[in-house]
Image (cartoon, rainbow, N blue to C red):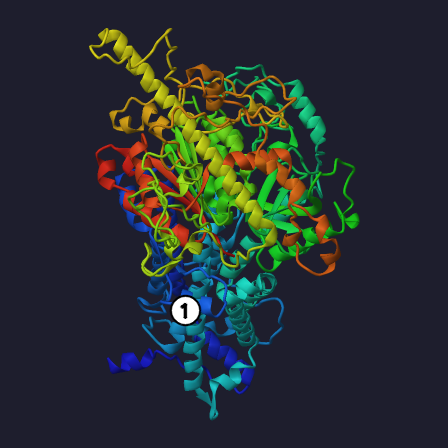
Amino acid sequence: MASTASSRPANPTSPSYSDDLEFVTAYLTVHALSDASHVYAYLLWIALGTLLLFWSTFHHLHLRGGYLGALWSKWALRRRTWRKKHSLAVAKAKGQPHRQPYSFPSNAQIFTVCLVAICTLVVSFVGPDNLAPGSYLWTLSKYPYATTSGFAKREYTMDQFMQFQPQYTIPKAWWTMGDRTGMIAFALFPLCVLFALKSPPFAILSMSLTVQVFCDKLMLLHKWTALLIYLLTVLHVAFWSVQLFIDHRNGKIAYFYAWQYEKFLFAWIAFGCMTLVFLLSIGPFRKRHYEAFWFLHILFVPLTIVMAALHHPPVWWWCWAALALWVGERTWRFTWWLYTNGFVGAKSAAPSSKLRKAQSRDKDPAPGQPPKVEGGYPYPPTLPSSAPGLDQYPPIVQLPGVGLSLPTDYVPPPGFAHAELLPGRTVRLRIVTPGYLTWAPGQHFLISVLAVTRFTTHPFTTASICDEQNQYDDGRVLVFIIRAKNGWTKDLWDTIAMMHARGQQCLREEHVPRCEMPERGVLLRACVDGPFGSSARASWGEYSSVVIVAGGSGVSYALSILQYICLCMAGRDGRFLGGRKGGYGQPGYKTSRVRFLWLVREFGHIQWCAPTLRRCLDMISPSELQIDIFVTNVKPVPQPNLATTPSRISFAPLPHKQELEPPRPEFARPKSISSLSSDESGEDSDVDLSYYTGFVQDEGELGHEEHVLDLTNFEGDNDAAMPGEAQFNLSIKNEGRSRRFLSRRASTALQAKEQLTQRASQLDFEGPSHSSVQLVRKPHPIPPIDTSLPPPVRVSVGSPGSRASSSSDLGTRRPESQSTDGRHDSYSSQTSLLKTPTSAAPLVGGSMQTQLPPIQTRNPPGAPGRKRFSHLSTLSERTDLLPTPTTSVTPRSTSRLSQWTDTDSFAALVPRGEVENVREQLRLNLDEQEAEDVGIVAEHARPGKPKLERILADEVERAKGAIAVACCGPTSLDAMIRKIVAAQIDPQKVKRGDMRGSIALFSEEFSY
């Protein structure tokens, strides 16, 4: 036994050579793993391939919606955040900006990372390191050996000394552990690159045949796989360093001789580059110097892979595979980038906006045309192959929601971005690419504005949808809502502000083609790369209800999904909108309701997306779409004490009272301010006003100190109050409050009239009363109320007049509610008359004989005589049904916000400096149509923080099947939504066949 052990030492003896280079070459060759030992790398990839196959099967068979899927989702969705105690108070005392709490990955991401790490560690350390030839299952030794790199010319090669390699199994030794960890690090190179690739077909995980998960969800795995590679490399260096320090020759350690070996030099170059990549990828440096990080990453990562391959040729094909994936994907993306941005291929020219509007007016459909089409559209037998989906039947004017994504009617020329400054230091970009481009709702693009920087791109989510059936360029306008922070976004804001200050609409050096110039904003040359994003895997039509939650500028993601769902519910086919096949009236389409929740910091931020929200409101009925906007940076106005009982919620200290107050009769009619402010009274069960007493909660829902900014502000958002916005915010707040007041009054009037009609019918049926008092005088029969009409939850949704869009004339709707399920009785139309989606409480009592304020029907002077179907326009036509002769319903011509353009300067949003002398030239260019849209959407905006848990619970009870929740916002909002959704998932309901227990979460959160 002893002789056997001595003949098979763990540290094999190297042949003695007088030449140092020959010695070190033989030494390192002898201390190399056999081909049989490479089986560990193959086992790693077999395990990863099995995991991918299981994940793909789980996805394509829709097992996520079953009982097992509900069990998995209930645990896997959750994520946690952490914040040091009293850190908010310390930051406030030091004047530091607000920062989000530290966010941990979701349980599913942690599980996946741990699974990859465990597999890696198992194949790195379990079992003997060096397997004897012939004791393995399979090998690639039949393939020719690659012994030289081709870049170095040496006298000695490895194949000259292969005969001295040990022909037996070695369990553990310093050099075997070093070789094995290095081999597994090599095997992880392709996996790490796969997680970082953005575009299929090279991004295999992003293909529809697999799991269709893009880099936004895989970036965490990319980072942790890279960390595993670096840790294995550190172990490889450490183990081999110990071995080289142990071995001696002529009184010198082997380390001294190793420096004469060129492959040893390649190893240290690769390790140095990898260390630089690791240090430069640390979060603080990456966030503060993203462009530097990107350039250095592109430089050092390929250099690391190449040097690693040259270091050890026997396994260098792992490195070449990783490099081939990276180069192939970059080449593929660059080719499409050239086509998309018009450098190669045919270019399209955008028609004039005036021509577009004129053509739409000439082809407007007749009044009464239904917006929803039962079943899919019929298509002609042959379709032109040059432009698929663009010239298909029916004509564009017969399609609901054409041009839905456009905030205005202006379409920029292809290859240019129309940039506008908005409140909240926000830029709205609209881009039409020269090459035809499609995308799925919720996907993002990499944007480059050449006037800001030429060589770097930045990711932003599009707030628009791709309408392939729209033959005009406004069907493929990319809309981006970009909030200026630091770095590139601030440079973009400053560039546009400077152009405004100088009176420039474009830059001369960018050679803008002859086209119609915008009435407001500027034109900038822009390029895009994409689309990317895992939202393409969502099948929205498979869910009966969809709840969309957005925080701050995360509304871009929410807007895109909202438009897609509204168009599908209006009868459009989702396959022509960038999504999956299906729409209202088509087999298998299930969506019947969508609720949109937006947490925003200021009322003025509503302008970001008011036109789109208004068009969505006009497209489908209120029972199908409910929009709630919660403004968190508004404190309620102290109200006079009009009641003897105190309010349930106290917003501010009680005002100082005199010793003796004048008498106030309890039966006195409340002042109008009380009615107008009732939406801030805290009576709405969906609104949380408790945070008004203090913005910091010691122990919130996430288990640590919480601040209201956690739900609306991304890292770096600047909330400094600027003079130009304060008055604008107040105007929108007052406009929305007035509209809610009118809606409640109108709703109460209809309800009271219905009650009077029912009471009169009962009196007619019962005959003369024995009472000497005549309760109701009926000189002639009162016409009955049409109870089939939907509740008047919106003050006005009339024709915008200035827009000639087919979405403005949608005709008669289908019935709002088709459910006969007994569990939905609480959501009857009678209940809807009592409370609008955003009302605080209905007005009841003796105020019915008060003259109603005017209700606006939104038909501007000079507009065509067409009428869009709306609840309030129907109400205005039936003024004879209102309760008293003194009641009147008259249109209000325009929103009070339409006068904002003439009086309020927006110059305060421009940074000081060169533009100081011309600051007054910069104004808030809010045209009349957009002001009207802002005013209408303001009705759905109210101060407070939503009670998300209660809202989701209500939607679950109201749903008819499975539910989807889409979320995009700061990490705290994402963590809160995940917690709430996980709590509402009920696997037992799913097991019983009640699919309301199944909730799918689609969230966007990516960091580069």
Q: Residue at x 65, y 29 (%)?
A: 472
Q: Quadrant of the N terminus?
A: bottom left
Nearer-the-camera pick, 624 or 897: 897
> In the image, what residue type sits under mark 1?
Thr
Vertical placement of residue 94 versus 386, above or below: below
Mark 1 highlights which residue? 181
Residue 507 percent location from the top left of the image: 76, 49
Q: Is residue 714 visible?
A: yes
Vertical placement of residue 680 versus 860, above or below: below
Q: Residue at x 44, y 33 (%)?
A: 741
Q: In the image, is 201 to the left or to the right of 211? A: right
Q: Residue at x 29, y 79 (%)?
A: 5
Q: Is residue 166 visible?
A: no
Q: In the image, is 192 to the left or to the right of 928? A: left
Residue 655 percent location from the top left of the image: 39, 53
Q: In the image, is 712 to the left or to the right of 326? A: left
Q: Residue at x 66, y 54 (%)?
A: 910
Residue 439 percent location from the top left of the image: 55, 38
Nearer-the-camera pick, 518 or 314: 518
Q: Residues within 10 Å of mark 1 (few under 14, many from 20)?
A: many
Residue 75 percent location from the top left of the image: 29, 50
- Image quarter of residue 407: top right
Q: In the image, is 766 to the left or to the right of 184? A: left
Furthest residue toward left: 770
Furthest residue toward bottom: 251
Callout 1: SS = helix
